[in-house]
Image: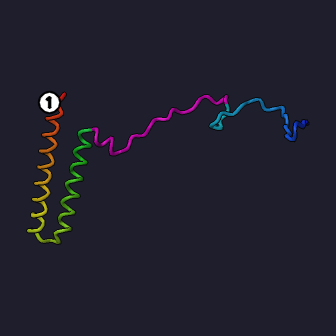
Amino acid sequence: MASASKKTGKSTVSRSGNTRRRSPAGNTASRSRSKKIVPKTPLLTVFKESSGGRFVLILVTVVCILGLDFLISLNQFDRFFLFLGIELIAAVLIGWIRFVLRGRNDEDN
């Protein structure tokens, strides 16, 4: 039976019985075996790290851009090729700027 003692208005109850302590996670201390948690990497990161994945990402991007151009041009091929030409020029300029900036970073190191 539980006995209670009074100390300045606060009551405490002493219990006997369960001697196993629970960890903060709620598991008992006797269950030390657990599965190792392997961090999951995002699928996009896995694709970026492999050469085949990069090829697939580039292919999907090109198909999406061509499809978007075709939808915007509304089946008028002169508009389609105009948009496509502007995008190709922009891609070449961005690639050239990245190439120049990487060259400067390599010279600094």
**Other-residue count near label 1 (Cα within 10 Å), few / some / many at <14 / 14–19 / ≥20:** few
- Residue located at (14% from left, 44% from top): 97
Q: Main secondary structure of the magenta part?
A: loop
- Residue located at (65% from left, 38% from top): 26
Is residue 2 visible to us here? no
Quarter occupied by the C terminus: top left
- Answer above or below: position of 76 versus 65: below
- Answer above or below: position of 75 versus 107: below
Q: Quadrant of residue 18?
A: top right
Is 42 inside the magenta-drawn segment?
A: yes
Most distant residue in the front direction: 8
- Residue located at (26% from left, 43% from top): 53
Residue hosting label 1: 107
Q: Quadrant of residue 65?
A: bottom left
Is residue 11 visible to us here? yes
**77 relative to 3 in the view: left or right:** left
Q: Quadrant of residue 87?
A: bottom left
Q: Nearer the viewer, residue 48 or 96?
A: 96
Residue 60 is situated, as x and y percent measured from the top left of the image, at 24, 53
Residue 9 is situated, as x and y percent measured from the top left of the image, at 87, 41
Q: Which residues are magenta?
A: 29-49
What colour-coding does the image apply? Answer: rainbow
Quarter occupied by the N terminus: top right
Task: Label 1, secondary structure: give it.
Answer: helix
- Residue located at (84% from left, 32% from top): 16
Q: Amino acid at mark 1?
A: Glu
Is 59 inside the magenta-drawn segment?
A: no
